[in-house]
Amino acid sequence: MTEAVAQIVDTVATRGDLAHLALLLWAGSASLLSAHALRELGRSNRRFEDFVTAVAQLNRLLVEDD
């Protein structure tokens, strides 16, 4: 994959269109960052769901004892 990226960069650089290269790099990094943020948000939601489930189980145990 890095060879393909290097080839794209070389092609754009030889044509002298550095603005398009900068835009490509910006768009790629923004896409990767947003994908990472969404993945972390999903993990956070799962951890929160586990926490809420544990609190509900504890609540059920405490209510049964009374």
Image: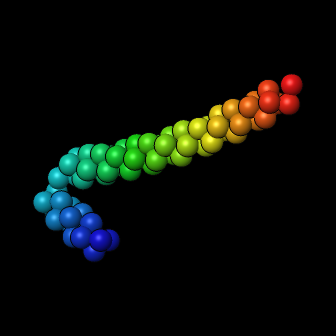
* Residue 6 showing in the rendered view: no
Where is residue 41 shown, x and y percent of the image? Answer: 50, 40
Image position of 52 with respect to 1: above or below: above
Q: The N terminus appears in which quarter of the rendering? A: bottom left
Please state the horizontal and vertical placement of residue 49, each as a whole percent of the image: 59, 38
Specify the quadrant that holds the C terminus. top right
At a point 40% along the width and 47% down the height, the residue shown is 35
Q: Nearer the viewer, residue 32 or 4?
A: 32
What residue is drawn where x is 49% and y is 43%?
42
59 with respect to 27 (left or right) = right
Q: At 85% from the left edge and 30% from the top edge, which residue is drawn?
A: 65
- Camera-side residue: 66 or 46? 66
User: From this viewpoint, which residue is outermost toward the left?
Assistant: 15
Question: Measured from the top left, where is residue 46 in percent x and y?
Answer: 55, 43
Where is residue 10 shown, x and y percent of the image? 21, 67
Rendered residue at 24%/70% (across/down): 4
Residue 51 shown left or right of residue 2 in the figure: right
